[in-house]
Amino acid sequence: MTNEQKKVNLLGLSPQKMKDFFVEMGEKPFRAQQLLKWIHQVGLEDFDDMSNVSKVMRDKLKEMACVEYPEVIYHDISKDGTQKWVMKMPGGSSIETVYIPEGDRGTLCVSSQIGCSLDCSFCSTGKQGFNRDLSVAEIIGQVYVAAKSFDKPGEKRERKITNVVMMGMGEPLMNFDNVVDAMALMMDDFCYGLSKRRVTLSTSGVVPRLYELAEVSDVSLAVSLHAPNDELRNVLVPINKKYPIKELMKACNHYMASLPDRRKLTIEYTMMNKVNDEMEHAEQLAVLLKDTPCKINLIPFNPFPNSGYERPSNNRVYKFRDYLHSQGFIVTIRTTRGDDIDAACGQLVGQVEDRTRRSERYIKLRDINDNSPSV
Ligand code: SAH
Ligand code: SF4
C-alpha cells in the first residue's frame, strides 16, 4: 500500500458518497454497489481483479482512485480465538482493534480516534491524551482488515464479524461524521450487512451529539455511566461537569425513543474498588435507572500502571450485581480472562513495545453470567 496522493480512497466512501463519486464521473449509480461489494464483501483492493468492471472503467479508476487500508504491525491470536490487531496510522501513531468470539457471535471492538480528549480518570486511552480523529477509511479499515484476515483462499467469505462495538480507543461522538459514515458502511447490505441492533456506539456522554445521532442513525447505544451521582462522576468522567447525569439520561432516553424498534440502553459501569462499588452506589443507581429500560453491564476495572485504581474483589462485584438484580434489573458482568491483558477495555494504548512478552498470555472478554454480547 503506497500512500497515493490525490487519489480518492474508495474504502472511506460511505454508500451515498460512493454513489456521488460515480455520478460525478458520469457513470450509473449501480457502479457504486459493484465497487462496495468488491471492496467490503470480497476484500479486494486491486481494480484489475474486479471481474464485472469493464477494462475502460478499471483504467479510469486506477487513475483516480485507490483502496488503501491501515497497515497491520502486530496481530495476535489467542488459543480461545480472541484476536488483536495493532494498526499503524500515517504519522506514526497506532490504534488497536480486538475481535472477541462468543459462541455463534463474533464481536469486533473498533477504535474511533487516536487517543482521547475526554480524560476519564481510569482509562489509559484517556491518559495518553488526544492525537487525532480517525478518517472513515481508518475506522472501516479496521473491519476490512479483520474480515479479510478470516478469509480462506478460494473460499467464499464466512461472516465471522456479527457485531461491532465502537468501544476501542477514542470517543466516537467526538468524531461524529466519520463514525456515522463508517457505521453506515457496517450496516449496508452491499458491505458488511450488520443489523442496526448489532452495531453499538459507546459514549461517555457528549449530550448534544446524542441528539444529533438520533437524527441520522439507529444503531444501539451504550453509555459509560460509571457513577450514580454527579459528585463522583465529575471526578471519574470529567465531561460530566459539562453535561451532568440528568441531562445525559434525558438525551439517552430521547435517543432510545427515536429508534424504530424497542431496544434497551446499555449502561456501562466500570467498578473501581471502594470508589464506586459500595452498596450506597448500587442503591443510588437503582433509583437513577428505575424508569429507563436498560441492561447494566458491570466492568471490573482493568488495571494499568499508575492508574491509582484497583479492581474490586469478585465478592464485591457479585454483591453489587445481586442488589441490582433484586431491584429487577438485567445485569451482566464483563470479565477478563488471563492477566496480561492489554486488549481489555480501557487498556488500548496503541503503543508497540514489548509485544512478544505480552502475547504469551492473552485474554478473552465475555459476560460470565449470560451469553449476550460484550455490551
Ligand atoms: N469513549 C467511549 C468508548 C471507548 S471506552 C466511552 O467512554 O464510552 C469503552 C468502555 O471501556 C467505556 O465504558 C470505558 O469507560 C471503559 N473503560 C475505560 N477504561 C477502563 C478500564 N481501565 N477498565 C475497565 N473499563 C474501562
Ligand atoms: Fe475517552 Fe472513553 Fe477513555 Fe473516557 S473512557 S477517556 S471517553 S476513551
Image: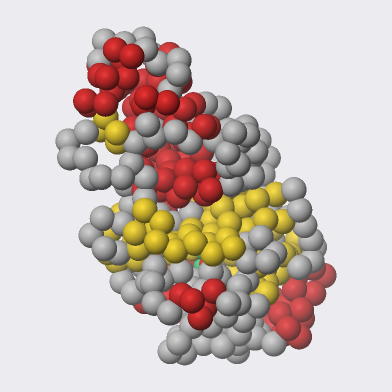
Q: Nearer the viewer, residue 271 or 336?
A: 336
Q: Quadrant of the N terminus?
A: top left
Q: Residue furthest front?
A: 154
Is residue 65 visible in this depiction of the protein?
Answer: yes
Q: Quadrant of residue 278?
A: bottom right
Reply above or below: 108 against 148. Answer: below
Q: Quadrant of the C terminus?
A: bottom right
Reply above or below: 234 against 159. Answer: below
Which percent across, then down, holds residue 213? 44, 42
Q: Quadrant of residue 31?
A: top left
- Name the residue at 17% across, 36% down: 6
Q: Nearer the viewer, residue 57 or 109?
A: 57
Is residue 168 visible in this depiction of the protein?
Answer: no
- Name the residue at 22% across, 26% down: 64
- Name the residue at 34% across, 59% down: 88
Q: Residue furthest right?
A: 326
